[in-house]
Image: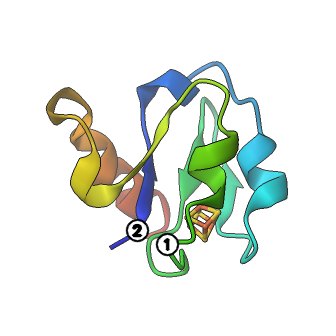
Amino acid sequence: MAFVITSPCKDEKAAECVETCPVDCIVEGDDMFYIDPDICIDCGACEAVCPVEAIYPEEEVPEDEEKYIQLNRDFFK
Ligand code: SF4
């Protein structure tokens, strides 16, 4: 399990999460940030600071945002 960044991050890129993550697993992409699911320790710190509520625990990602689970995974391949 990991936390997942979803569409509200697109073109927003507030970046509070990057500063907050204790294991530095949030990386900047072209249009949004991504969480490396292999490194994320599920602390939830990023979810709490995201001003656009783009971050969810994987099992709570809304149905219409589920493609972001794979997009976050793929970013780190
Ligand atoms: Fe980083 Fe914690 Fe967010 Fe995972 S849940 S990305 S470890 S801040």
Q: What type is the residue that disc 2 sits on?
A: Ala
Confirm or reject: label 1 Cβ below 8 Å from ligand 1.
Answer: yes
Q: Quarter of the picture for ligand 1?
A: bottom right
User: Which quadrant is home to the N terminus?
Assistant: bottom left
Please name the residue that numbered disc 1 is placed on: 42
Residue 18 lies, with reference to residue 2, above or below; the image says above
Could you say which quadrant of the image residue 10 lies in? top right
Q: Residue at x 30, y 52 (%)?
A: 69
Q: What type is the residue that disc 1 sits on?
A: Asp
Q: Residue at x 53, y 79 (%)?
A: 41
| Secondary-structure class at tag 1 | loop
Confirm or reject: label 2 Cβ below 8 Å from ligand 1.
Answer: yes
Q: Are marks 1 and 2 in contact (CB under 8 Å)?
A: yes
* Farthest-out residue, left: 63
Please name the residue that numbered disc 2 is placed on: 2
70 left or right, relative to 33: left
Q: Nearer the viewer, residue 48 or 24?
A: 48
Disc 1/disc 2 C-alpha distance (Å): 6 Å
Could you say which quadrant of the image residue 25 lies in? bottom right
Q: Nearer the viewer, residue 8 or 28?
A: 8
Q: Nearer the viewer, mark 1 or mark 2?
A: 1
Q: Position of residue 56 (x, y in %)?
A: 41, 47
Q: Residue at x 57, y 48 (%)?
A: 47
Residue 40 lies, with reference to residue 51, above or below; the image says below
Q: Position of residue 21 (x, y in %)?
A: 73, 64
The chosen color scheme is rainbow
* Farthest-out residue, front: 48
Mark closest to the chain's N terminus, 1 or 2: 2
Q: Check disc 2: other Cα within 10 Å, few if <14, some if 14-19, many if 20+.
A: some
